[in-house]
Image: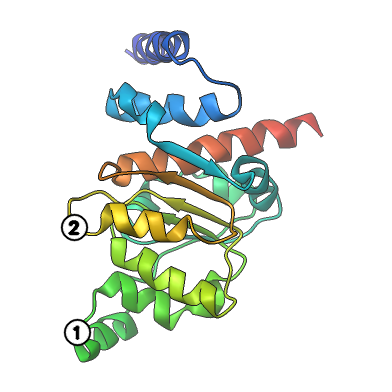
Amino acid sequence: MINEGKKIERTSFDIIEEKLKMPYPEKAIVTRIVHATADFSFADLVVFKDNPIEIGIKSLLEGKNIITDVNMVKSGISPIARKLGCKVLCFVSDDETRVLSEKEGITRARAACRLNKSKFKDSIIVVGNSPTSLFELAELMKDGFNPALVIAAPVGFVKAKESKEEILKFPVPCIAVTGVKGGTPVAVSIINALIILAQQNEKKT
């Protein structure tokens, strides 16, 4: 069964790679998204801004923190990240986050950003669910709390599209899924693709 599973996965990747007409390394990122979603339309939705792949690889090899908007995204990140020296963090379930969320009437994802803004600076931010976390991140960036890289992939019909458009206005490396599509599998696919590229880069040195 293990060999059969590996064969199915490899065949799936081969099919996707054959159909995708784009340069490497962007192709490596989009291939994983399509593999997770069976949706080739993502090839036209993903935006790579300000050299995010090279910056992402460099940041991972430097052991930068990876901060996610929800625990579901955190749980999907490859353990290779920790082997590279990165901490994978999520603050959405912290007691302090809950208290601020209830006090201010804001989402926990937004409250988590606001309470931990110093940790967001120079970290890799991975958002797969919460548009409000991206809006809050935009406010943090206005105050100089710039992350090393933003992966912006929240899904939904309410403010998801607009939140990604807002993040793309800033001069910060970003991989964004434009429009209403996205979600945990997409965000996880992007960061894990970067982690694999970083690991391959590490082995070459």
Q: Residue at x 49, y 78 (%)?
A: 117
Q: Residue at x 65, y 38 (%)?
A: 198
Q: Who is closer to the viewer here, 133 or 166?
A: 166
Residue 49 in the figure: left or right of residue 160 = right
Location of residue 108 by image quarter: bottom left
> How far across and down, in percent of the image, does residue 5 sit?
35, 15
Q: Residues within 10 Å of mark 2 (few under 14, many from 20)?
A: few
Circle 2 — which element?
Answer: loop
> How far across and down, in percent of the image, does residue 141 sit?
53, 72
Q: Residues within 10 Å of mark 1 (few under 14, many from 20)?
A: few
| Amino acid, disc 2 | Val
> How far across and down, in percent of the image, does residue 64 sit?
63, 59
* Label disc, if present, on residue 45 of the rendered structure: none
Sequence-wise, which precedes: disc 2 or disc 1? 1
Circle 1 — which element?
Answer: loop
Between the residue at mark 2 and the residue at mark 1, the CA separation in whole angstroms equals 17 Å
> How far across and down, in percent of the image, does residue 151 sit?
46, 50
Q: Residue at x 57, y 74 (%)?
A: 145
Q: Who is closer to the viewer here, 7 or 41?
A: 41
For the C terminus, the quadrant is top right
Color encoding of the figure: rainbow
Placement of 143 over or under 173, stated as above or below: below
For the N terminus, the quadrant is top left
Placement of 205 over or under 154, stated as above or below: above
Q: Who is closer to the viewer here, 149 or 201?
A: 149
Reading the image, the residue beneath label 1 is: 105
Reading the image, the residue beneath label 2 is: 158
Q: Residue furthest right?
A: 205
Location of residue 104 by image quarter: bottom left
Q: Residue at x 57, y 34 (%)?
A: 196
| Amino acid, disc 1 | Gly
